[in-house]
Amino acid sequence: MFITFEGGEGTGKSTQVTLLAERLRAQGKDVLTTREPGGTPEAEALRNLLVSGETSRWTSNEELLLNFAARGSHLRQVIKPALVMGKTVICDRFIDSSYVYQVAAGGASTLLFAQLINTIANEAIPDFTFILDIDPAIGATRAAARSATAHESRFERKGSEFHNKVRTAFADLAAQQPKRCHLIDANGTAQVVAARIREKLND
């Protein structure tokens, strides 16, 4: 089973990845958690280029190329082998983030996006995608409190207009693909949000 978590900045994706993994392991499942961009040494190096520095460092098309270069390494070395072995893979961000951040909110080429999917990520479709939804202003406050990741703030600094577009695009995605994508209210404590995710997964 391949599960992904999506959403804007500060929605609590990493926390929910951890909580769901703990619950599934308690049920006897073999679970691998990972993240994008990242998951391999090569992809982590590209992550550093993407999430740090000035907001104008890359165009949206360049971000797409870097993300998919990292994704190719991640799929080949980590995700696909784990799925073949029967593991449950839970990933913090995946292809939906590339579409929302670079194409829908950033204006990157839809043709380039489609070509990259066909070339690098063909058939890599999650079984379940949980999209955590919260007011971007609240998310920004949460994200700013994460001092441990202050150097990874390039996307957080893109401004309210960009992040409102991100929220809208994720909601649209959930409406367009209701069998795979589930919009989760990310307001409340981590345990309250985790209960909402469990309910959807059980359904």
Image (tube, helix red, strand yellow):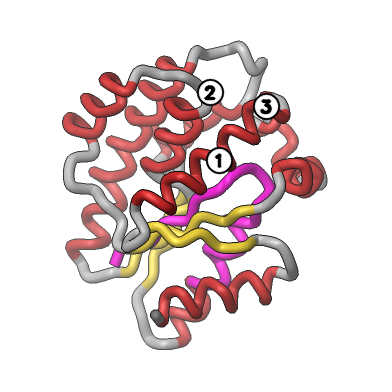
Range of magenta residues:
1-20
Q: Nearer the viewer, mark 1 or mark 2?
A: 1
Q: Is residue 42 above or below residue 198?
A: above
Q: Is residue 88 magenta?
A: no
> Amino acid under label 3?
Glu
Where in the figure is residue 91, as x and y percent of width and height? 43, 55
**Residue assigned mark 3:** 161
Give the side of residue 67 with respect to residue 194, left or right.
left
81 vs 175, nearest the viewer: 175
Where in the figure is residue 36, as x and y percent of width and height? 45, 43
Q: CA distance from mark 1 to mark 3?
A: 11 Å
Looking at the image, which residue is at 63% across and 27% down? 162
Looking at the image, which residue is at 30% across and 26% down? 113
The disc, 1 or 3, on the residue closer to the chain's N-terminal end is 3
Query: What kind of element bears circle 3?
Result: helix
Q: CA distance from mark 1 to mark 2?
A: 26 Å
Which mark, residue 168? 1
The disc, 3 or 2, on the residue closer to the chain's N-terminal end is 2
